[in-house]
């Protein structure tokens, strides 16, 4: 049989070394393109939200009121959870650090160790997880219900830009509150560990000596690490929650399906930002 007489199926057979399952490669390529498109869209929305937040015309009375309301929901109402968690971490981390360093005669390293472990790593991460579980998940459900019930389209029909009225104040409130809650968490944690350490004779430092040791151990990079970690984490996780809810295309009873993927994205974004900041500074 010469080349002209060979059937068409002969030319469709995979050659030696050629992938035998082009369907799998196609699926992988489509998935990769889909993820890249989603990332590009997310970056574009993030840039647009930041640009709008920098414009004075954006912050009209209704937007300011929504921003303050979200700050109350994300920040003020989360304070009991933050303080309770800080008390537990203060007893479990700060007190134990002071106790064991004194046992081994290395108390002079307490400040440096607490700054590295608590201030730079534990505090931003735990606060971010609390905000994600308590507030970002609410963004997904709330905006998903609004999208399913047609309330977003109703706002648009009334001449109210949902992007400015709904997304921008929530994202900025999440960013500001993430920073503020991290400061509160850090102060309460250190104070709890210090009080417990003095009460149980784990340390004999005075308040002035303890504060001075912590501040002396913190260099410019450590002071910069707090805002450079918490502000982007709050911004990105808030944006993940809003975009996840606004992209919902189902019915109201199915809105809870947004939570697993949305929370996973927010947690992964938190870890990536934390790692990048740690590496850079």
Image: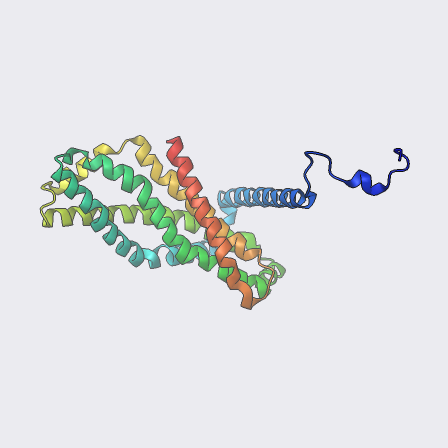
Report which quarter residue 124 is drawn in. top left
Q: What is the tally of numbered marks visible in this picture?
A: 0
- Direction from residue 164 to residue 71 in the image, left or right: left
Q: Quadrant of the N terminus?
A: top right
Q: Residue at x 39, y 32 (%)?
A: 279
Coloration of the structure image: rainbow
- Looking at the picture, how far across and down is residue 151, in whole percent? 57, 64
- Direction from residue 25 to residue 114 in the image, left or right: left
Q: Residue at x 56, y 56 (%)?
A: 246
Q: Residue furthest bottom?
A: 253
Q: Quadrant of the C terminus?
A: top left
Foreground pick, 176 / 106:
106
Task: Tell me, yes or no, if residue 4 can be seen here.
Answer: yes
Q: Residue furthest front?
A: 1
Q: Residue at x 15, y 43 (%)?
A: 99
Query: In the image, is residue 134 above or below residue 149?
Result: above
- Direction from residue 201 to residue 56 in the image, left or right: right
- Looking at the picture, how far across and down is residue 148, in whole percent? 58, 64
- Direction from residue 174 to residue 150 in the image, left or right: right
- Looking at the picture, how far across and down is residue 89, in whole percent? 25, 50
Task: Tell me, yes or no, if residue 70 can be seen here.
Answer: no
- Looking at the picture, how far across and down is residue 163, in whole percent? 55, 52
Query: In the image, is residue 122 above or below residue 224?
Result: below
């Amino acid at each position: 049989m010469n080349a002209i007489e060979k059937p068409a199926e002969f030319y469709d057979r995979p050659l030696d070394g050629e992938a035998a399952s082009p369907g799998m490669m196609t699926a992988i390529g489509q998935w990769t393109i889909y993820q890249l498109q989603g990332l590009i869209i997310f970056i574009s929305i993030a840039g647009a939200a930041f640009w709008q937040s920098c414009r004075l015309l954006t912050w009209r009375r209704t937007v300011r009121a929504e921003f303050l309301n979200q700050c109350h929901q994300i920040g003020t109402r989360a304070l009991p959870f933050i303080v309770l968690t800080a008390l537990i971490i203060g007893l479990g981390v700060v007190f134990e650090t002071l106790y064991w360093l004194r046992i081994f005669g290395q108390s002079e390293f307490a400040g440096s160790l607490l700054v590295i472990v608590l201030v730079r790593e534990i505090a931003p991460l735990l606060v971010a997880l609390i905000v994600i579980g308590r507030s970002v998940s609410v963004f997904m459900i709330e905006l998903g219900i609004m999208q399913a019930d047609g309330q977003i389209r109703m706002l648009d029909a009334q001449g109210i830009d949902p992007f400015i009225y709904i997304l921008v104040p929530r994202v900025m409130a999440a960013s500001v509150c993430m920073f503020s809650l991290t400061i509160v968490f850090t102060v309460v944690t250190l104070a709890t560990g210090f009080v417990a350490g003095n009460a149980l004779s784990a340390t004999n430092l005075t308040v002035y000596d303890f504060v001075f040791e912590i501040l002396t151990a913190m260099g410019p990079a450590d002071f910069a690490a707090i805002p450079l970690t918490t502000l982007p984490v709050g911004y990105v996780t808030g944006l993940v929650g809003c975009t996840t809810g606004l992209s919902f295309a189902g019915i109201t009873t199915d809105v809870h399906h947004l939570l697993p993927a949305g929370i996973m994205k927010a947690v992964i974004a938190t870890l990536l930002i934390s790692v990048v900041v740690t590496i850079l500074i």
